[in-house]
Amino acid sequence: MMALKAINLPPLSPARPNEILLPPKPWFVALTLLFAFLFNLLPWTGVWLALKPDFLALVLLYWCIQQPRWIGVGAAWAFGLVTDVSQGALFGQHALAYSLLGFAAEYFHRRVLRFPLWQQAAHVAVLLVLAMVLVLIVRMAGGAALPEWSNFLGAVSGALLWPPLSTILQWPQRPPPSPGER
Amino acid sequence: MPALPSDETPFFRRGPSPFARFVFFGLFSLALLFADARYGYLESIRLGVGVVIAPLQRAALMPLHAWDAVAAYFASQTRISQENAELRRQLVVQGAVVQGAQALAQENGRLRGLLGAHAKSGGNDILAEVLYLGRDPFSQKVFVNKGSNDQVRAGQAVIDDGGVVGQVTRVFPAVAEVTLLTEKDHTIPVKIERNGIRSLLVGAGTGRAPELRFMSASADVQSGDVLVTSGLDGTYPPGLAVAVVAAVERDSGLMFARITCRPLAGVDRSDQVLIVPAPTANVPPRPEETNEAETPKRTGKGKRRAA
């Protein structure tokens, strides 16, 4: 406890809506995206596979909202192509979904950050479902079979994961508490 | 007349608007989807990206291995000795089966020699570990940790201890993509083990049971019948267990019976699989048409049938 106070870390709690965050380190952004990609590739099975949110989509969404000048539609699209290869999907399927997420995040980023985390999570759920429906329409037009309804559970679990995920991702950007606050 | 600066002119220049970029990348994605689905043009790009991400795909299995190691370290001695006794018992039982099978294989080889038939190939199966299940809602894919460096080729059959899992569809240097037999329209030529009736087992998509197609309503199929590969396609070696008939619906109004099946392999549960090379190497080439009197139209038909 003493050591924690000595290096003056901010508390691991959601940032207040009016709190000004420090700019993230580029290596931190890259590392979180890499880890999100790895999390998608873990050997998930059974119920966990059905419940698994798309970690990469969530982290991309977070950085598109926080840092739209670095991570935007183009970067999301490129990560989508890599995901297409790693999941054996058709080329452009995840890319289409992620570029929609990137666009929506860039478009709404000023507004969404004003909301408390659970309202942001509701936005995230709607966005994830919209991206799924867009891909669904395109693939059904191409003659694919209707996927299982449990596929949409990923959007719900993704939204539930949004508050803890954004708390963790914004932790390194929070300014250290000023001496007067303690 | 000079244009007046509108309110929407941004103070900082930031390139095209998000919507313009979304339209650009969205249309690009649609073009890629079309090119990949219709023409399969993009396999070389896919191979390149696949090579780059292969270390990540393989690294994602490390936490599981670490967990297994920790679990094995703390596993109780009694449980391990119980498991050991059980495995010994299985070994004795299966040893008897293997000895019988060896005698049968020798006999089979002699009979095939008498008939002048080619010996069956076998023995160069590749053991692979499942890395992860593909999370594409429209297809059933599994990735395994062996690739073209380990002589895995596209088209080879994949089995586990229960039966056929599916087929290798794409090969990267260190990773291979296996399409499961439950994939929509994935077809395996099978025969019913009980009476040798041949049919096609066609996958129906995620979460739906595969079906036997084009079986007449009067065909001798019962629920509980075991389906094995017939080997007619030259892709799947003959005699591998595939599925068991789950339900037979005979509707007099329809020409065919509706026969749903349950795969015998742990299609999306197994973690160790065996990649079985295709037995096509021994298939003799199609004989030349010797009848010179045949019209070109008929040979054309024959070729189409062969393809």
Image (cartoon, coloured by chain):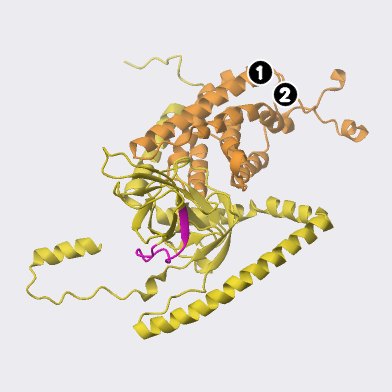
Determine the residue positioned at 32% across, 47% down.
B38
Q: Quadrant of residue B188?
A: bottom left
Q: Main SS type for the magenta part? A: loop
Residue A157 vertical placement versus A29 (above, below): above
- State which region is magenta: B230-243
Amino acid type, residue under disc 2 in the picture:
Pro
Q: In the rendered image, which residue does mark 2 sit on?
A: A14
Disc 1 packing (10 Å; few <14; some 14–19; many ≥20)? some
Q: Secondary structure at mark 2?
A: loop
Find out whether residue B234 is within the magenta segment: yes
**Number of the label disc, if any, that sits on residue A116:** 1
- Residue B268, given in percent of the width and then of the height, sits at 54, 49
Task: Identify the colour of chain A in the image.
Answer: orange
- Residue A128, given in percent of the width and then of the height, sits at 52, 29
Q: Chain of mark 2?
A: A
Instruction: Residue lying at the far right in this picture: please name it.
Output: A2
Whether residues under marks 1 and 2 lie with C-beta atoms below 8 angstroms apart, the answer is: yes
Q: Quadrant of residue B25?
A: top left
Find out whether residue A88 is within the magenta segment: no
